[in-house]
Image (spheres, rainbow, N blue to C red):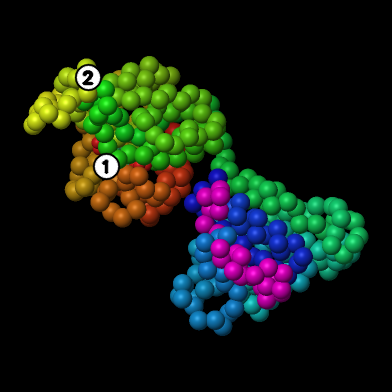
Amino acid sequence: MLDGKKIVLGVTGGIAAYKAVEVASRLRQAGAEVHVIMTRAAKEFVTELTFREISGQPVASDMWAPVTHWNVAHIALANLADAFLIAPATANLLAKAAHGIADDMLTTTLLATPAPLFFAPAMNSRMYGHPATQQNIATLRSRGAHIIEPATGHLACGTDGPGRLPEPAVLVKALDDFFRPEKTLAGKNVLVTAAGTVEPIDPVRYIGNRSSGRMGYAIAAEAAARGAAVTLVSGPSSLTPPEGLKRFVPVETAAQMREAVLAVFPAIDIVIKAAAVADYRPMTVAPNKIKKDAGEITLRLEKNPDILRELGQRKQPGQILVGFAAETENLLAYAQSKLEKKNLDFIVANDVTKPGAGFNTETNLAKLIARNGTVEEFPLLSKRELAARLLDRITEKNKAEL
Ligand code: PMT
């Protein structure tokens, strides 16, 4: 769930600050973009360099240092964050946050952000149990902040009790759970196609395209996370199929994709066709490897079936069809015409000439065109985030029509 999320990790001056290094590492491994803000006291425990290397981003700490990466650092971080995690959160930080004190980079940014806040208090048990700290925690909670309860156990001060920073996995899970979508697609059968088809020329060569499968796999993962029973039909891809699928059907050619799709289609509620299906295939496949000494050769191509068009013809009331259009010119006009010709409910128009958009990228830039002609334009997003936004829209239609 953290893939593509921008997490600001605030690190304060407690002995558990070293654990925040692993938190940053795990968040990054989960696909999050991690920005670390350290207080002055935190730097007594762990160096900025450590967090810079682990997060792969500059570390913010000094309000007065020249800013090279952002216009105004605390405002930029406050605006970009999808969530803040303060770990460890000392009694001092909790008190300042509860009372709106803004006297360093972290507390100033906390006041300026609209993002959800997660505090992981860690301190000596008596400090934690002190009415002042408990009151500050209650104040933060009453304003909607999430408090990740400290673990109980041996503390650095030599005592046992509540106040330990929970293990990094627990902190990361708290964020992951927060971003986990509601099961809005529970009970729905969703079919997603992904990656490019390959059309053999001879036993070792084929006609293919640059689709990696990332867009389709992201949609399948997001639909599964929302509770759908997902069938993913995929052309060759180096990606691991997402967890939680009902069915994964690997195929190679357009003909195989057609067969796999048509076999399940009658029981499907929503089809999303992100696959880049080859429009043409060689008319004949050479039984043996074509030799170079054949000199110039001519390949005769024939049209592949248009799978989506066929689905559009067979569509029953209540079934929702979503296509993708990868275009290099006249984006909206070409996409709109595909939506009509193929009898779709939505089409996702990709201008694949734009940097960061389309084939084999981690991100995509797309416009969603609905059957009624409305166009929604999304900013450059991770493919997972785009998948989430698309499913939000499709689910709205789903609620209204199914
Ligand atoms: O896999 P990635 O590297 O993440 O790249 C993602 C992507 C660029 C492949 C994806 O975002 C995308 O745009 N997919 C559609 C690519 C495409 O083939 O577009 P098209 O305009 O040629 O086809 C229009 C629609 O008809 C598509 O939904 C396609 O799946 C479908 N089609 C096309 C031809 C055909 N013979 N049968 C089909 O079903």
Q: Residue at x 32, y 39 (%)?
A: 211
The amino acid type of the residue labelled 2 equals Asn
- Range of residues picked out in magenta: 28-53
Q: Quadrant of residue 232?
A: top left
Residue hosting label 1 = 326
User: Is residue 109 visible in this depiction of the protein?
Assistant: no
Q: Residue at x 19, y 48 (%)?
A: 329
Q: Position of residue 373 (x, y in %)?
A: 28, 43
Residue hosting label 2 = 288
Indicate the secondary structure of the residue bearing disc 2. Answer: loop
Number of numbered labels in the structure image? 2
Q: Out of 289 and 28, give the one closest to the viewer.
A: 289
Please rate how many residues cluster around mark 2, counting C-alpha atoms within 10 Å: few if below 14, some from 14 to 19, many from 20: few
Give the CA separation, mark 1 to mark 2: 34 Å
Q: Position of residue 249 (x, y in %)?
A: 42, 23
Q: Residue at x 61, y 62 (%)?
A: 9
Image quadrant of ligand 1 equals top left
Q: Nearer the viewer, mark 1 or mark 2?
A: 2
Indicate the secondary structure of the residue bearing disc 1. Answer: strand
Answer above or below: position of 254 versus 176.
above
Q: Out of 132 and 306, give the one closest to the viewer.
A: 306
> Do labels 1 and 2 touch, CB within 8 Å?
no
Q: Position of residue 242 (x, y in %)?
A: 50, 34
Q: Position of residue 181 (x, y in %)?
A: 56, 42
Answer above or below: position of 58 versus 188.
below
On residue 88, the disc is none
Quarter placement of the N terminus: top right
Left or right? Give the position of 32 relative to 106. left
